[in-house]
Structure formats: structure tokens, C-alpha cells
């Protein structure tokens, strides 16, 4: 309880950046176990960790499943409060009704984009999203194309692959780590593009992890996730203790500051 109160107080203190951010890239690497991160498996992400802020003590929601966790991540609400307590969605069904980080970004004057690798994540598309696509193989390419254009940009990119490797060969297996290395190598040029766009913020996290060849259960390993943040300016220190996935919206919102009028 004390750990949770420390993090809550830190969020209420309102961490801010000295200069207004012009470019935001948020990456959710589906099923990323924080123990998989190393110089060998993920040098690009390790570079962000060295220069920015990170914690390997992130925690997902119950149950720790893809759509439920991403809804909590984007809305800042627990499944009970958001109403999204199942892990399914199909086109034509109702979409998210609560404010998400993409709504926040739009209100602060960003052009917004949302690229996701699993169809069910279409649930999080709202009127605040200027560009969105189911991007199972080319999400990084679509994000790079968007960042090649001038103007304030906020991109949320979901990347899949680790969940399949975990289910087939086991979380933290050789195949799982190889898949992470591939993802890290794919992300490297996108991270380089963002760093060239002036004032930027990069956030990398995940929705859940897994154990053995399973995920989405009550096993403690399934709830684990990392949080990595990097910017062209000094970021506020993260508070000690466990970071909840539901804290991410308030954290990023505070770092964006007041922003400008909506486009």
C-alpha cells in the first residue's frame, strides 16, 4: 500500500518538461517480459534506458490480457471502471467511450495516429484519431512515413510477435529472445527518426508478460511489464515502487503539458 501511495503522490505532484514536446511516440510491445531486456537482445531499447528513465516493476491489470490491458493503459481506468472486462472486439461493435491518451493528444494540438497489430485493438479507435490502421507487419513503416511530415505528431504503435513466440516456445526462451531482437532492430530506425524531429518524448511499455507457454492467468509473471521513457530533455525521476499500467495515461498527460489549441 505504501508503494502505491508513493507513486500516486508523485503523479499528483505533476511532473513536467521544461520545453513543450513536438513529437510523441508511444510503443506497446505486446507480451514483453521485462527480464528479456538486455544489451544482447535489445540494444536500441537499452540505449533509451541509459539516457532516459525506466522501471522493470510495471504491473498489468486483472486479467492481464491484451485488449483489457491496453484499454487500462489508454484510459487510465481499471477494467471495472472502464467496463472493458473481456478480451474481444470485432468491427461494428461499440468502441471505447472513455477519454484515451489519443483524445488528450488531439486536444493538445497533435495530429494523432494509431497503428495496431491485432484486430481487437480497433476497439480503441475514436474520433480523436486522425489516422489509424491495422498494421500487422508494417506499423513501423507507417509510423516512419508519418514522422517524415512536418508538424506536431503523436503516434501510438502496437507491435506483436512475442506472444506467439512465448506460446510456441516459452516466455524468455531462445526463440522468444530472438523475436525481441528482431523487434528491437526494426524499431531502431524509427527511434532515430523521432530523435531528429526536435523536442520529443518516447514511451515504450507492454500490456502483460507470461510464464512457461502461458499468459493471461493469475500467475505473478503474467502481470509483469516494463516502462521506458526517453526525451531530448531531462525527464522527472520515476518514483520508487511498482508502476501500474493504469498510471500511464496520467503520467504522459502531465508530461505533454498544456499544449496548444486543437488543430
Image (cartoon, rainbow, N blue to C red):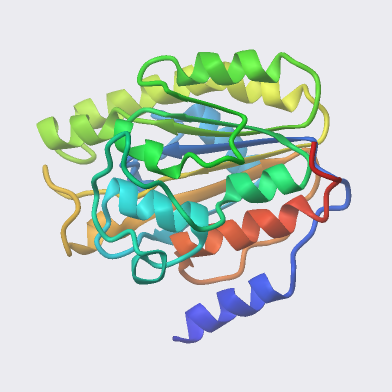
Residue 148 placement (x, y as % from top left): 71, 14
Of residues 104 and 257, the one nearer the viewer is 104
Residue 237 sits in quarter: bottom right
Residue sitting farthest toward the bottom: 2
State which quarter of the image contains the N terminus.
bottom left
Q: Position of residue 96 (x, y in %)?
A: 44, 51
The residue at the point 62 percent across, 25 percent down is 191
Count of residue discs: 0
Task: Tell me the residue at 24%/36% (across/down).
Answer: 163
**Could you tell me if residue 244 is visible in this image?**
no
* Coordinates of residue 258 in the picture (x, y in percent): 83, 55
Question: Can you see residue 108?
Answer: yes
- In percent of the image, x 51 and y 51: which residue is there? 227
User: Horizontal placement of 218 versus 137: left or right?
Assistant: left
Q: Nearer the viewer, residue 189 or 118?
A: 118
In the shown orientation, is residue 259 left or right of residue 114? right
181 sits left or right of 223 in the view: right
Residue 112 drawn at (x, y percent): 64, 33
41 vs 15, left or right, is left
- In this rendering, is residue 149 above or below 99? above
Is 83 or 78 nearer to us in this picture?
A: 83
Image quarter hosting the C terminus: top right
Amino acid at each position: 500500500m505504501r508503494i502505491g501511495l508513493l507513486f500516486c503522490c508523485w503523479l499528483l505532484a505533476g511532473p513536467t518538461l521544461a520545453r513543450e514536446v513536438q513529437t510523441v511516440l508511444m510503443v506497446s510491445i505486446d507480451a514483453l517480459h521485462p527480464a528479456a531486456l538486455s544489451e544482447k537482445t535489445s540494444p536500441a531499447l537499452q540505449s533509451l534506458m541509459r539516457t532516459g528513465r525506466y522501471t522493470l516493476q510495471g504491473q498489468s491489470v486483472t486479467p492481464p490480457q491484451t485488449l483489457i490491458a491496453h484499454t487500462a493503459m489508454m484510459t487510465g481506468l481499471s477494467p471495472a471502471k472502464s467496463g472493458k472486462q473481456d478480451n474481444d472486439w470485432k468491427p461494428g461493435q461499440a468502441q471505447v467511450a472513455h477519454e484515451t491518451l489519443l483524445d488528450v493528444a488531439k486536444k493538445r494540438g497533435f495530429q494523432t495516429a494509431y497503428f495496431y497489430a491485432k484486430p481487437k485493438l480497433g476497439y480503441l479507435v475514436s474520433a480523436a484519431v486522425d489516422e489509424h490502421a491495422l498494421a500487422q507487419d508494417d506499423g513501423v513503416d507507417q509510423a516512419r512515413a508519418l514522422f517524415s511530415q512536418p508538424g506536431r505528431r503523436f503516434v501510438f504503435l502496437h507491435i506483436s510477435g512475442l506472444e506467439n513466440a512465448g506460446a510456441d516456445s516459452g516466455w524468455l526462451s531462445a526463440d522468444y529472445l530472438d523475436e525481441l531482437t528482431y523487434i528491437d532492430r526494426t524499431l531502431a530506425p524509427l527511434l532515430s527518426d523521432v530523435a531528429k524531429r526536435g523536442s520529443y518524448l518516447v514511451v515504450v511499455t507492454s500490456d502483460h508478460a507470461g510464464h512457461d507457454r502461458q499468459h493471461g492467468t493469475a500467475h505473478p509473471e503474467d502481470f509483469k511489464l516494463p516502462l521506458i521513457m526517453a526525451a531530448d530533455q531531462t525527464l522527472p525521476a520515476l518514483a520508487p515502487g511498482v508502476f501500474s499500467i493504469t498510471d500511464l495515461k496520467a503520467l504522459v498527460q502531465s508530461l505533454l503539458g498544456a499544449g496548444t489549441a486543437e488543430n
